[in-house]
Image (spheres, helix red, strand yellow):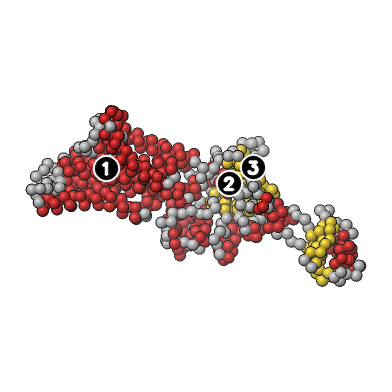
Amino acid sequence: MNSTIQAGEDSLAIHTQNLGKRFGSRAALDGIDLEVPRGCAFGFIGPNGAGKTTLIRLLLGLAEPTSGRMRLLGRDLPQGSSAALARVGAIIEEPRFSHHLTGRQNLQVHAAARDRAATGRIDASLARVGLVPRADDKVKTYSLGMRQRLGLARCLLCDPELLMLDEPMNGLDPAGILDLRHLIHELVAEGRTVLLSSHLLDEVQKICDMAAIVDDGKIVAQGPIHDLLNGGTRAIDISCDRHAEASGLLAAVRGVARAAEFEDQLRVTLTPEAPVDREIVTELLRRLLDGGVAIERVAPVTASLEERFLTMTTPLEDRV
Amino acid sequence: MFDLRLIGAEALKLRKRHGMVALAIALTAGVAVLVFTVTAVQHASNAGKYGPAGGLAHYRDAVGFLILMILVVGAIVGSTAGAADLESGVFRDLAATGRSRIALFGSRIPGAWTIVLPIAAGAAAIAAAASVALAGSLAAPSAGAIIAGTFALLLAGALGSALAVGLAALFGSRGPVIATLLAFELAISPILASLSFLGGVRQVLPGESLDRIGQVSLHAVPIALPIAMLVIAAWTAVAFSVGAWRTKTQEI
């Protein structure tokens, strides 16, 4: 074990250091340093082909890294993988089942690979994802959304400390997404950790406490969602009259990087040194009022995870 | 390495493939019933032209034929046990539980046996009962012959399944495994057995060993019984080892 990953770091559910995976000359993962604390919902987001699923496969022992270290639930991998994975439930890309078996029989098959108590958790798991009425129907009659829910039920069989969910919203209708959001919140409230890999950035923002953004095999940012959102440029939109005069007044305010017309209003872009919103907004309004500009509305621009994501990841046209 | 819960799960997956199980029964017990029924009807309608359907010689012929059919059934069931989870993607989810991949693989062979061996036993019982009941003026098969024949059929089921499971893990899909095993058992092996210049090398052919164990009258290569047993055990071990190695080392 690398000396910088200490065995006592059990506050982390997942810890990787300089983790790499190459397929021939192509690096699917390159120097991934990921820290996922226990007891949180952690979003793992990135464009297609960024390496999200590859990382999950490495953590689950489905493929071997070409470099770096991994630690899962306080155990070094691969040495401690059996013990660690016994408390990990995972959906990888899309949950797969034996379609000629019923939902319940599929869970029985999976429970046989888990601890002896897993079979006793089948009914509760089915109930938790709302599949009891269809549990004895063959899986080939299930919709994609039902298979996703059955996949979640399968994750719960091991009473997981950690769930790794790779695109679990695929195929879910809006009500299903809402149910899943509630379920993940419940799971986290029970002290479990959820690693959520998803393209639905809005959902990640709603569900997760923390996130990592991966691009081209590298993590470009990670931390609390709030910090990620605030890591971008701050701006304030002001609806007023006399835009040209107003922008000249505002550009002279300390802490303003730029003031320019944007969608029928003024967008005031702030420098990193600008004071907190309350102070800078007060100053901006004072300048405008002193200058005789009539103000209709003032609103700080709220960055979304999507906007942050797009500024951090490689545009589609630039990907090799 | 062999976990009863995993074996039970494997058996469940196979048992619920009703079409495959019906085909396996039809190819063995069904064919045995058909052959004995037709020859019995022929004998009843013209005893001068057609001899009794039963007797020792017919029993040995039936065992020889059923060995082939049970190898075919073993190929079908074993390849399904070995490759279905890989093809469907279920194996990835099972491997992600942290269970030993060897244990997951190890459950497939006995899982296939839970389907194939009862079918082989049923076919053996039909052949034995019909050979005794329909012996007429001919010598009925002795208890020793029936035991040898039944044992050979069970071994054929065990070997056929094990070979298919091992190859399926290697290939990752059912079709090539069934094609390979059928080609080997039905075409390549008989040709090799007939090439006398190969001499004792032909003893490694599993079909010849099964014929020897079952005391089938037409086996072409002289083999001592212990050697025949050893050959079957070695093929089973090779199949297990190859499949286990592939299952353990492949990235999913």
Q: Is residue B97 above or below residue A153?
A: above
Amino acid type of disc 2?
Answer: Thr
Q: Are marks 3 and 1 on the same chain?
A: no
Looking at the image, residue B134 sits to the left or right of residue B157; the answer is left
Label 3: chain letter = A
Question: What residue would you read off at disc 2?
Answer: A54
Alpha carbons under labels 1 and 2: distance apart: 46 Å
**Quadrant housing the N terminus of chain A:** top right
Label 2: chain letter = A
- On residue B193, which mark appears? none
SS at circle 3: strand
Q: Is residue B24 above or below residue A239?
A: above
Q: Are marks 2 and 3 on the same chain?
A: yes
Q: How many numbered marks are there? A: 3
Residues marked 3 and 1 touching at CB (< 8 Å) = no
Q: Report crowding for label 3: few under 14, some 14 to 19, many 20 or more residues within 10 A (C-alpha).
A: many
Q: Residue at 88% of width from left, 57% of height from top? A: A254
Earlier in the chain: of badge 2 and badge 3, it is 3
Q: Residue at 12% of width from left, 41% of height from top? A: B139
Question: Residue A100: x, y in percent?
Answer: 41, 56
Question: What residue would you read off at disc 1?
Answer: B67
Q: Residue at 31% of width from left, 43% of height from top? A: B71
Amino acid type of disc 1?
Answer: Ile
Looking at the image, residue B243 sits to the left or right of residue B132; the answer is right
Question: Residue A259: x, y in percent?
Answer: 84, 61
Amino acid type of disc 3?
Answer: Asp
Q: Report crowding for label 1: few under 14, some 14 to 19, many 20 or more residues within 10 A (C-alpha).
A: many
Residue A32 is at least partly visible in this image: yes
SS at circle 1: helix
Question: Residue A136: x, y in percent?
Answer: 42, 61
